[in-house]
Image (cartoon, helix red, strand yellow):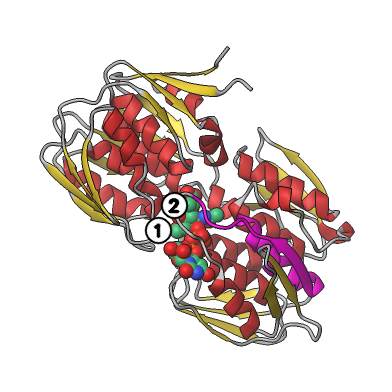
């Protein structure tokens, strides 16, 4: 089958204004939460990306009535017609966040059968903490040899204390979903604090749940049986798309304003761009990034929120390839999230990788090459590199990019990039 490619001719300054889409990682958590409601839910500001498409297909497979207008980003879910509590392999293999259906189905129906994708290119991605949390509130959870999770709560779920070994985003979300209809109070200690954890808490509370402390490392959930939304809920803007567009602006020495974003979500990246010598101006719901002279190399280490996000490590490391001097990148969250750098070397980058640490020696220029995206944010890194490089870069694996970025090439073209897709004959 013809392989689709993204072709970028680099060295063009990005200039102008671009609006960020709704958040991928918040959407894939809030959509399954609609299962918890007694009545139909309306969710707005959803991005038209592969992960949302798979979420719609999953809800429809379970029996929910779903109407979705991709370009308006509005979805209505009526969960009252759901009849299934098992999800097939082919749906789960297309979206990492399928694990959230364990917590949601367990809370609503007292059972769930969800085959989980194993590891991926960035790491093993275990869910032991998800399982630990559900057991702590009364669920029986087993995993069969094929990796299918079987969860049951014959006597219903009752509140409990959950001590997470690490502030896992997915683990926190899954336990919040499971606990939302449990009898009594569930307390999650060492909870993740990412913006989409707060967004999920706000959505659950808009349905009548009682979630307190989201955004801190202790979250308390008083489960409610009768959850029903009182109004449509708009998901927050995508923190990682915002950051990717900010990095692309700096990479092309451009002048770009990203609108519809939340500047406080971007502080770790903003601080690093300023340290590199870029200019960043924040407004209420917009961030302007300008960059004129050479960038200074910096050191950064990925951390849980509000530290430097692991999802921006890959595009940021592309930007550092042409910074002056040496930069050091430490990937503390996932065990193998530096593989994109080998593709950068094909474009002339000077990188040495030791386990989770990359030392990047800035070079004057990158040159275009045929490169392959190995995962979603590696794809974003290659796009940033292509925008910087002399000549044309051909990127394959564009389906990874489509999982998390809505109309990325349209957005970049509107800012002056020379970027298009082509199918090999
Ligand atoms: C979410 O993944 C995001 N995915 C990831 O975004 C993001 O990189 C990650 O959070 C960190 O912010 C979605 O939201 C759909 P974790 P998740 O559980 O939930 C270990 C993207 O590009 N761990 O916080 O899987 C795990 O192995 C994607 O948009 C356990 O050991 O992240 C990892 O090393 C990529 N046991 C670390 O914790 C568990 O039970 C962080 O994982 C769970 C996690």
Q: Quadrant of the C terminus?
A: top right
Q: Residue at x 41, y 40 (%)?
A: 378
Distance from mark 1 CB to nearest ligand 1 atom below 8 Å: yes
Q: Which residues are magenta?
A: 97-120
| Crowdedness near tag 1: few (<14), some (14–19) or many (≥20) residues, C-alpha within 10 Å | some
- Percent position of residue 424, x then y: 55, 15
Disc 2 Cβ-to-ligand 1 distance below 8 Å:
yes
Q: How far is the residue under mark 1 from the one under mark 2?
A: 6 Å
Note whether 75 is above or below 402 in the view shown.
Answer: below
Residue nearest the viewer, comparing 237 with 284: 237
Q: Residue at x 76, y 54 (%)?
A: 88
Q: Where does residue 164 sit, x and y in percent of width and height? A: 48, 78
Q: Nearer the viewer, residue 190 or 342?
A: 342
Q: Are marks 1 and 2 in contact (CB under 8 Å)?
A: yes
What residue occupies the far front of the structure in this picture?
A: 145
Q: Quadrant of residue 97?
A: bottom right
Q: Residue 89: where, in percent of width, then height?
A: 72, 53
Q: How many marks?
A: 2
Instruction: Give the structural element (helix, strand or loop) at label 1.
Output: loop
On whether residue 410 falls in the magenta region, the answer is: no
Q: Is residue 387 visible?
A: yes
């Amino acid at each position: 089958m013809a392989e689709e490619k993204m072709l970028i001719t680099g060295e063009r300054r990005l200039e102008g204004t671009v609006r960020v889409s709704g958040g991928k990682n918040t959407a894939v958590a809030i959509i399954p939460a609609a299962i918890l409601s007694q009545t139909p839910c309306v969710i707005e500001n959803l991005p038209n990306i592969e992960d949302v498409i798979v979420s719609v297909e999953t809800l429809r497979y379970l029996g929910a009535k779903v109407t979705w207008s991709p370009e308006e980003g509005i979805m209505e879910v009526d969960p009252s017609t759901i009849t299934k509590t098992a999800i097939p392999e082919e749906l789960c293999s297309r979206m990492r966040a399928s694990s959230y259906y364990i917590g949601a189905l367990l809370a609503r129906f007292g059972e769930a059968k969800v085959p989980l994708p194993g590891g991926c290119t960035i790491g093993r991605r275990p869910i032991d903490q998800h399982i630990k949390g559900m057991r702590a509130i009364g669920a029986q959870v087993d995993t069969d040899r094929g990796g299918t999770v079987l969860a049951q709560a014959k006597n219903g779920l009752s509140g409990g204390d959950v001590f997470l070994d690490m502030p896992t985003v997915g683990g926190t979300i899954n336990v919040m979903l499971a606990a939302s209809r449990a009898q009594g109070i569930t307390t999650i200690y060492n909870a993740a604090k990412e913006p989409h954890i707060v967004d999920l808490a706000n959505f659950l509370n808009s349905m009548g749940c009682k979630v307190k402390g989201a955004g801190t490392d202790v979250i308390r959930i008083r489960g409610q049986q009768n959850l029903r939304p009182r109004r449509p809920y708009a998901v927050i803007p995508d923190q990682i798309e915002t950051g990717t567009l900010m990095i692309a602006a700096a990479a092309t020495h451009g002048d770009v304003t990203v609108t519809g974003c939340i500047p406080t979500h971007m502080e770790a990246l903003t601080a690093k761009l300023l340290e590199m010598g870029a200019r960043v101006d924040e407004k209420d719901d917009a961030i302007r990034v300008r960059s004129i002279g050479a960038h200074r190399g910096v050191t950064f280490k990925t951390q849980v929120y509000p530290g430097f996000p692991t999802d921006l490590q890959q595009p940021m490391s592309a930007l550092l390839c042409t910074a002056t001097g040496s930069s050091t990148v430490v990937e503390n969250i996932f065990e193998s999230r530096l593989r994109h750098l080998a593709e950068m070397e094909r474009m002339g980058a000077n990188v040495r990788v030791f386990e989770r640490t990359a030392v990047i020696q800035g070079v004057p220029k990158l040159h275009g090459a045929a490169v392959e995206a190995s995962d979603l944010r590696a794809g974003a890194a290659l796009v940033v590199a292509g925008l910087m490089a002399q000549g044309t870069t051909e990127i394959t694996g564009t389906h990874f990019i489509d999982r998390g970025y809505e109309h990325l090439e349209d957005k970049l073209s509107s800012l002056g990039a020379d970027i298009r897709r082509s199918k090999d004959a």
